[in-house]
Image (tube, rainbow, N blue to C red):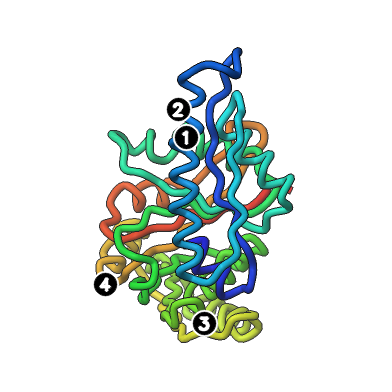
Amino acid sequence: MAALLAHYESGLIVPLSIAKAHVHMDEPQLTEALKMRQRLLERAVDVSKEFKVEAKPKIRIDDDVAQGISRTAKEENANLIVMGWGETTTLRARLFGSVIDSVFWSAHCPIAVMRLLEEPTKIKRILVPIKDLTPQSIRTVQFAQLFAATNQGKVTFVRVFNRRTPPKQTAEFETELSKVLAQGEHQVNSEIQIVRNDDVAQLIIKTSRSFDMVILRSWRRRTVVGLAVSDVTTQVIGELTCSMVLFGEPHS
């Protein structure tokens, strides 16, 4: 995914692998860990070559994996951190796992945490639930447009209003979102769906079954440990059956 985005933006990727530090640098376990990470980075470089993207692989020895990721991102002046999201036993472990949570808390740049169930190049139909048009939400819209542009995909933006919302309010939102899309740097095939439903989470889950990927937004609070999402997002994440991206930005 990182190679795909970097190729489209004429950028480079920094494949990073962290080895947990030991008190003694000659520990056999550390030596083996470094060898394994070197093999992983070689595979990452091979992928970048397939997309004709420059790669600058790095191995870092650090006491803290999350801090190692955040520090390297800052040192390399990264514009985006791309992380994978593996399946684990519970929703809380998936959502608030220590590494992901800590990187969200400390990183200086946007983060895209991805759970991909198929090859990125096969992801064409993208669903983006959107609640408001704050600067943070608009940057999530822009990220969705960027990803769709790399794949010639189509983005559907869905806004769910409750059944009592006045028609004038829904019409105004659609007009404003249309303006945001028109002003985007990446012009892609997109549509807006305005839906009336009192169960937002279930509507999104049901709609997602016709899509390859859903892009959701998170936010960060420095007063608590990193990652925060709404109750709706938590429920959606727990029941999605397609690929997913959780997109978040720096606290600042």
| In-image side of 107 versus 120 (left or right) | right
Q: Secondary structure at mark 1?
A: helix
- Under mark 2, the amino acid is Glu
For marks 4 and 2, the one nearer the N-term is: 2
Q: Earlier in the sequence, mark 4 or mark 1?
A: 1
Residue behind mark 4:
210
Q: Residue at x 34, y 63 (%)?
A: 204
Mark 4 vs mark 1: in front:
1
Give the residue displayed 46% in from the left and 20% down from the top.
29
Q: Position of residue 144 (x, y in %)?
A: 51, 70
Q: Are the residues flagged by discs 3 and 2 in contact, CB closer than 8 Å?
A: no
Instruction: Indicate which disc, 1 or 3, sits on the residue closer to the N terminus.
Output: 1
Determine which residue is flagged by label 3.
Answer: 171
Q: Which numbered disc, 4 or 3, marks the residue that appears first in the sequence?
A: 3
- Residue 95 lies in quadrant: top left
Q: Nearer the viewer, residue 182 or 164?
A: 182
Mark identifier at residue 35: 1
Front residue of this view, candidates 121 and 41 = 41
Q: CA distance from mark 1 to mark 2?
A: 5 Å
